């Protein structure tokens, strides 16, 4: 078990570069399963969830190789449609592979995916998509899918689920005829996936809107493809919120400003300076500011649930009140336990947390219950008085590459111990 030990109080100064998006790469890697050419991803961070996804691909018979930061995946030799339970349970994104496996083999065999415990996270919308396309689905904890053929269909997702949108796309691109998918997720990671699928030869229209139209193709190309994944908007948001919490001046490279617009709008009154040029953002902050009003999470383009724990941490020391409403995951407020131990004034009721800003937080022993909750503990540790020890820190490694190195470079006092 890892612990992060943080001595808070230092302002952050300097320059860092954001990684390619974890939540962008996981669907891109899943898409490789249905492609027989080699795909090279420029700049792929070796974070835990991505390494597990690569293990899944290897288990299924695919190959991958890292050449420094670049990753090449070759699924021409893929031979299995059975996902190993021990790997499937390690990451939620294992479910993203099922649409591609069905498209490739017309069969899939898997057990329920794992992932951060931030809610029940059922897979009913995914399974409904498969059934609409003509797939027979049997089983409960272990699921077997089979289809003689995949038929284009009209599908309306009952929620704008990111994962179900991914599976609907992957399973339909080689289906017979046209598939219309309504109420889809519009996250930038979905648009990036569509860009890759089009390079594979898929015919998809409507990216960035709520309805996607897929005209099934008989065969995809087999040419080698080079692809640039989008930058990690959640990593960018995490460092921006760390800077606003401590004060200081930082530049982040490899940023897409539009992808983080909902965050930048929320914080603009609390920044001394914010300049965006090319793919760089420069932010200066005194570390002080006013309460943020209401922060309500919802699917893109609204405020991302994946930044809710981090902005909650930031809000604990702002003058005035902030109300956090978490609408995406029913159990994503556990980080408030840690924040309260550190002195935050918070009232949590159902999916809502009312935060009254206090002057300072105090270092304490806290736990990273999940990936973004862990990031929120790190932000609190950076700005508080004294020492904070964040246990279960390996969960943070699922989504952040070189976290300590980047924070040390910005002047934070942080180190890791392994027990
Ligand atoms: C993706 O998860 C992300 N994961 C999550 O990132 C992110 O929080 C989430 O989208 C929402 O933006 C990856 O990309 C790997 P959903 P996903 O399907 O696809 C319910 C992070 O910290 N739902 O959009 O699993 C579900 O329970 C994380 O990086 C059903 O009810 O999210 C949730 O309440 C964690 N039935 C809501 O929809 C279903 O079949 C949104 O889930 C599917 C989902």
Image (tube, helix red, strand yellow):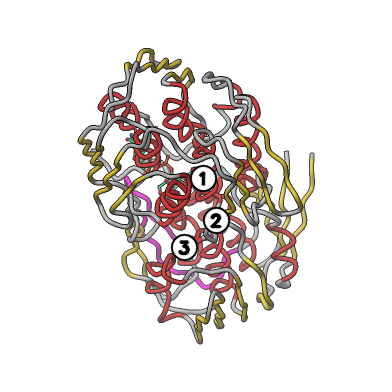
Image quarter in which the N terminus is found: top right
Q: Where is residue 261 in the image (x, y as percent from the top left)?
A: 39, 70
Q: Residue 311 carries which label?
A: 3
Residue beneath label 1, please?
Answer: 28
In the depicted view, which residue is nearer to us: 254 or 124?
254
Labels 1 & 2 near each other (Cβ < 8 A): yes
Estimate the spatial distance between the alpha carbons at disc 3 and disc 1, rounded to whole Å: 28 Å
Q: Residue 347 lies in magenta, yes or no?
A: yes
Which type of secondary structure does the marked residue at label 2 adopt?
loop
Q: Give the range drawn in magenta.
A: 341-361
- State how many labels appear: 3
Estimate the spatial distance between the alpha carbons at disc 3 and disc 2, rounded to whole Å: 25 Å
Horizontal arrangement in the rendering, residue 413 relative to residue 85 (left or right): right
Q: Residue 274 lies in magenta, yes or no?
A: no
Q: Could you tell which of marks 3 and 2 lies nearer the N-terminus?
A: 2
In the depicted structure, whether residue 160 falls above or below residue 219: below
Dot 1 alpha-carbon crowd within 10 angstroms: few under 14, some 14 to 19, many 20 or more:
many
């Amino acid at each position: 078990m890892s612990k992060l030990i943080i001595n808070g109080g230092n302002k952050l100064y300097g320059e860092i570069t954001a990684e390619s998006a974890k939540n962008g790469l996981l669907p891109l890697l899943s898409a490789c399963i249905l492609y027989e050419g080699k795909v090279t991803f420029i700049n792929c961070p070796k974070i835990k969830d991505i390494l597990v996804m690569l293990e899944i691909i290897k288990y299924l018979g695919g190959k991958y190789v890292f050449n420094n930061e670049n990753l090449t995946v070759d699924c021409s030799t893929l031979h299995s449609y059975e996902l190993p339970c021990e790997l499937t349970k390690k990451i939620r994104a294992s479910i993203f592979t099922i649409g591609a496996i069905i498209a490739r083999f017309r069969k899939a065999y898997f057990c329920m995916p794992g992932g951060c415990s931030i809610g029940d996270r059922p897979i009913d919308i995914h399974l409904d998509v498969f059934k609409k396309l003509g797939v027979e689905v049997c089983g409960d904890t272990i699921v077997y899918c089979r289809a003689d053929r995949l038929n284009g269909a009209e599908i309306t997702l009952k929620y704008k689920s990111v994962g179900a949108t991914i599976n609907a796309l992957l399973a339909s691109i080689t289906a017979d005829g046209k598939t219309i998918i309504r109420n889809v997720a519009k996250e930038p990671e979905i648009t990036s996936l569509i860009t890759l699928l089009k390079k594979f030869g898929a015919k998809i229209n409507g990216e960035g809107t709520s309805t996607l139209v897929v005209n099934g193709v008989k065969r995809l190309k087999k040419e080698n493809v080079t692809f640039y994944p989008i930058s990690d908007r959640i990593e960018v948001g995490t460092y921006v919120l760390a800077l606003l919490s401590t004060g200081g001046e930082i530049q982040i490279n490899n940023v897409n400003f539009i992808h983080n617009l909902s965050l930048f709008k929320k914080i603009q009154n609390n920044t001394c300076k914010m300049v965006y040029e090319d793919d760089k953002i420069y932010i200066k902050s005194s570390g002080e500011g006013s309460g943020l009003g209401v922060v309500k999470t919802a699917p893109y383009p609204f405020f991302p649930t994946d930044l809710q724990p981090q902005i909650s941490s930031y809000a604990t020391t702002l003058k005035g009140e902030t109300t956090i409403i978490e609408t995406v995951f029913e159990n994503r407020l556990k980080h408030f336990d840690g924040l309260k131990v550190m002195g935050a004034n918070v009232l949590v009721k159902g999916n809502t947390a009312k935060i009254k800003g206090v002057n300072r937080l105090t270092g304490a022993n806290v736990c990273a219950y999940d990936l973004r909750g862990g990031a929120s503990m790190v932000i609190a540790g950076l700005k508080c008085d004294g020492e904070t020890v964040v246990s279960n820190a390996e969960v943070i490694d699922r989504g952040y590459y070189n976290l300590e190195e980047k924070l040390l470079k910005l002047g934070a006092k942080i180190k890791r111990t392994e027990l």
